[in-house]
Image: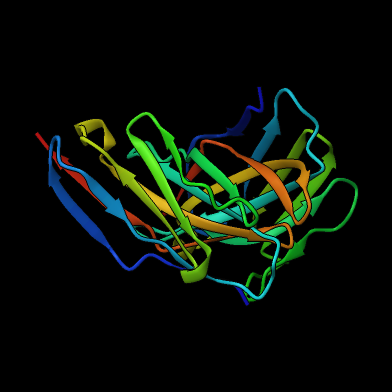
Amino acid sequence: AQKVTQAQTEISVVEKEDVTLDCVYETRDTTYYLFWYKQPPSGELVFLIRRNSFDEQNEISGRYSWNFQKSTSSFNFTITASQVVDSAVYFCALDNDYKLSFGAGTTVTVRA
Amino acid sequence: GAVVSQHPSWVICKSGTSVKIECRSLDFQATTMFWYRQFPKQSLMLMATSNEGSKATYEQGVEKDKFLINHASLTLSTLTVTSAHPEDSSFYICSASRALGLASLEQYFGPGTRLTVT
């Protein structure tokens, strides 16, 4: 069985602070994909990143960065210098066997 | 590219009536489409997987006779909530996919449909 755990339910920060969202996953498969999605108040899911299980390189995209640690089954996401527009629910997801399993989500609130 | 639309974006219906939600892939052919349901402040839960021209595969606990899925073409899937009740009120999200590679499909999500049953 697959499982994705996002232990942080809500995080509140002041603008310009950094925020790290934790994601821990469980799978018995050696080939799988990990994702992060952003869901703003409008409800539409916004794709942020996809990483396959064979690529452990960390990735940076603007103010976003991801840390994939296969040894600890974690795929953490950091927003640097947060902005009010970053306020949203962020989901981590695991895909193998052609199905996505989502974590419970972390609500990020960035205060001006 | 890879745009997925849903119609309607929101709908209010009376208890006991049926509601149809459409999911379209606008600029690509989707081999597989997925339907998710999201209750307020909860995560997305996969309801069913549908492949064009074949019957949908429902997740455990999802009533296939209540949530009818039709995937008649490579660009259109429909979800019909039959005899809707207030507990069916939710945000329904579809995704359309094409093969990404080993063990994964690249899923493109629609904007969602908010269903309220009164």
Q: Residue at x 60, y 61 (%)?
A: B46
Residue B83 shows in the view: no
Q: Residue at x 33, y 68 (%)?
A: A7
Name the quarter where the C terminus of chain B is drawn.
Answer: bottom left
* Chosen colour scheme: rainbow
Report the front residue among A57 and A75.
Answer: A57
> Where is residue B84 shown, x and y percent of the image?
55, 59
The front one of B71 and A65 is A65
User: Quarter of the image holding residue B89?
Assistant: bottom left
Q: Residue at x 28, y 36 (%)?
A: A86
Give the left or right position of residue A37, taking residue A98 as reference: left
Q: Is residue A27 above or below residue B51?
A: below
Q: Is residue A85 left or right of residue B11?
A: left
User: Foreground residue, A48 or B64?
Assistant: A48
Front residue of A81 and B48 = A81
User: Is residue A93 something that shows in the picture?
Assistant: yes
The residue furthest right is: B53
Quadrant containing the N terminus of chain B in the rendered view: top right
Q: Quadrant of residue A97?
A: bottom right
Position of B57 compared to A39: left or right? Answer: right
In the rendered image, residue A95, in percent from the top left (x then y), is placed at 63, 58
Q: Position of residue A4 (x, y in %)?
A: 49, 67
Measuring from the top left, give residue B103's x and y in whole percent. 76, 57
Where B117 sits versus A46, above or below?
below
